[in-house]
Amino acid sequence: MKINQKIKKVAFIGMGLINSSLARDLKIKKFYLSSSAYSRRLSTINKIKKLKLVDFASSNIEKIIKEADIIIVGIPVAAYQEVFKKICNNIKPGAIITDVGSVKKEVINSVKKYIPKNIDFVPGHPIAGTENSGPESGFAGLFKNGWCILTPNKNTSKNSVKIIKYMWQLVGMKVDIMDSNYHDEVLAITSHIPHIIAYSIVGTITNLQTTIKKEVIKYAASGFRDFTRIAASDPIMWRDIILYNRQSILKMLNLFKKDLSKLEHAIENNDDKFLLNLFTKTRKIRKEIIK
């Protein structure tokens, strides 16, 4: 395949928020001639068919990937090994496998033995999403102006990387190439730990006395709602992400706990200078992020 060559078939394994949004965008952009989608649940397959996201949907994964030029894996990371094991003997020679998972290093290590030598795996992570899941939650334009990180190894064909890079640029993303271990450390602090904190705070609320809990829920301000919105994300997906990236997460959690301890100490000692300095510095960083 060449970067300017028409992709004959794209196969989507899993049709959650990311893959269903990507299917919509790539269909609009006419990136491929035909498409297929795999799900192990009949209810999901029926939704995919009703929404007309692809040309063919089935729970038979071998049929779905048959003759596919590009296979896009969009399932919980704990299921990767089982899926790669199933498809490894049925992939078209010269095809490209990519994925949309939030963890890279452990996933790559768990599946590399199942990837045939004539197949390129270009791991990817589009940094986009909402707290919703399922094929009905996807929408065209989800990826516009976002970042996608690719983590290919040194032996991956440059042409395969170019094709996957072009695919994400076509749907509006900026693309960076990154080492898989470095990716996991960056995402641990920018995505995974914020999710852990959101889940934890909502968990704390559930343990409050019934009367207090009612008032907290009743008077929750927009800031609290915005922050805890991500605690409504798919629990299976996030359980897997946390466990598969536990090394990087624990490293960043340790740094966070040290900073939190300093903040606690400042509050105990009425240290207004420390608090003002911290809030001023973080306010500036927040403005840079939004900018």
Image (spheres, rainbow, N blue to C red):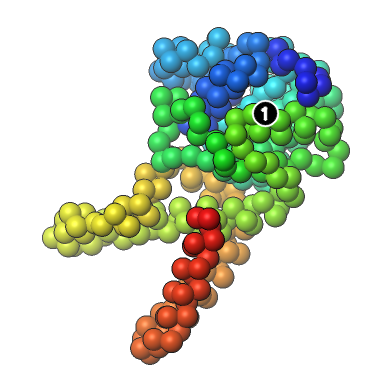
Judged from the image, the secondary structure of the residue bearing numbered disc 1 is helix
Q: Is any atom of residue 25 visible in this view?
A: yes
Q: Quadrant of residue 14?
A: top right
Residue drawn at (59%, 48%), measured in percent from left and top?
Answer: 244
Number of numbered tags placed on the structure image:
1
Q: Nearer the viewer, residue 282 or 92?
A: 282
Q: Position of residue 92 (x, y in %)?
A: 76, 16
Q: Position of residue 273 (x, y in %)?
A: 43, 87
Q: Quadrant of residue 5?
A: top right
Q: Is residue 242 left or right of residue 225?
A: right
For disc 1, the neighbor class at 10 Å (few under 14, some 14 to 19, many from 20) is some
- Residue 75 lies, with reference to residue 47, above or below; the image says below
Q: Nearer the viewer, residue 70 or 199?
A: 70
Residue drawn at (50%, 31%), measured in percent from left and top?
Answer: 141
Residue kind at label 1, given as amino acid type: Met
Q: Is residue 238 left or right of residue 147?
A: left
Q: Position of residue 152 (x, y in %)?
A: 76, 40
Q: Is residue 173 left or right of residue 2?
A: left
Residue identified by numbered label 1:
167
Q: Is any atom of residue 63 visible in this view?
A: no
Extreme left residue here? 211
Q: Quadrant of residue 121?
A: top right
Q: Which part of the image, by quadrant, shows the N terminus?
A: top right
Q: Position of residue 267 (x, y in %)?
A: 37, 83
- Residue 275 lies, with reference to residue 108, above or below; the image says below
